Image: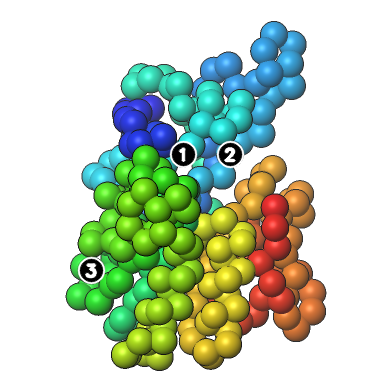
Amino acid sequence: MTANEPLGPYRVIAAADPAGPVPAAGQFFMLSAGERWGGGEGGRPFLPRAFSMLRREGDELRFMLEDVGPGTNRLATLEPGDGLLVVGPLGAGFTPGDTRRALLVGGGVGVPPLCCLQDELLAHRVETTALVGFRSATHAAAATLLRDPRVATDDGSIGHHGLVTELLERELDGAGGSERTVFACGPPAMLEAVRRLCVERALPAQLALESGMACGFGACFGCVVSLRAGGYVRLCVDGPVLDAHVLAEVPAH
């Protein structure tokens, strides 16, 4: 661990990874603390936690997390110099291809992979529009990780009072909306709304799904999702980024 910084109610942590491969936007890592990674004396060890990369800066990997349970609490309390076990990059990330106008749609802790993607797209002179939703102005501090974002909040304390998908619908129905490619990451209900909006308009969309993962390598089959054409895929090896049009729906956790 090289850094642990507050960002509203979130934490941005960093780990040195000088010899690791360069990850693609949307890929993830399995993180665990080097010490005290378990339920106390004689307690059961925690499973590693899956996190999409926020950015790679020099030899450092950066991640954003929210302290919502015992595992994320332990990660949130690590200090520079503490051991952080990092396994990755894993999974399939975003594939922008020849995209020229990108709509990035995020919610809460789903913002990090969109930051990495926006960096890549801007470096290739791709026009990006970022739409992000949060519970409140306090949580919307994470919007500062993106360039020129448009913000929605559930309580109306900043930006649009409502859902980020309402901003998306307006954008898609406006001038040039049919020329966009959508890239999204966030809670399941948000992603399902994004999927429906894009499928109805026959727009290309890539969704980074969230799922509890025990291994990250496809061995446990704990992160399967169903496909429109039948069958299943494992998010840890076939995703977490999937084409919206191949999904039957975005499942709730």
Which residue does the numbered mark 3 point to in the structure image? 122
Residue 36 versus residue 246 in the image, above or below: above
Residue shown at 61%/69% (left/top)?
192
Tell me where residue 167 appears, x and y as whole percent.
41, 71
Tell me where residue 253 appears, x and y as whole percent.
70, 52
Tell me where residue 118 appears, x and y as whole percent.
30, 64
Residue shown at 65%/80% (left/top)?
246
Select label 2 or label 1 by which is in front: 1
Between 4 and 168, the one nearer to me in the picture:
168
Distance between the alpha carbons at the discs numbered 3 and 1: 25 Å
Between discs 3 and 1, the one toward the N terminus: 1
Residue flagged by tag 3: what amino acid is it?
A: Leu
Q: Residues within 10 Å of mark 2 (few under 14, many from 20)?
A: many
In this picture, residue 90 sits left or right of residue 20: right
Is residue 27 visible in the rendered image? The answer is no
Q: Residue extending furthest right? A: 231
Select label 3 or label 1 by which is in front: 1
In which image quadrant can residue 197 be found? bottom right
Residue shown at 25%/76% (left/top)?
126
Between 169 and 225, the one nearer to me in the picture:
169
Tell me where residue 116 appears, x and y as whole percent.
34, 57
Q: Residue extending furthest top? A: 41
Which residue does the numbered mark 2 point to in the structure image? 49
Label tally: 3
Which residue does the numbered mark 1 point to in the structure image? 65
Residue 185 versus residue 89 in the image, above or below: below
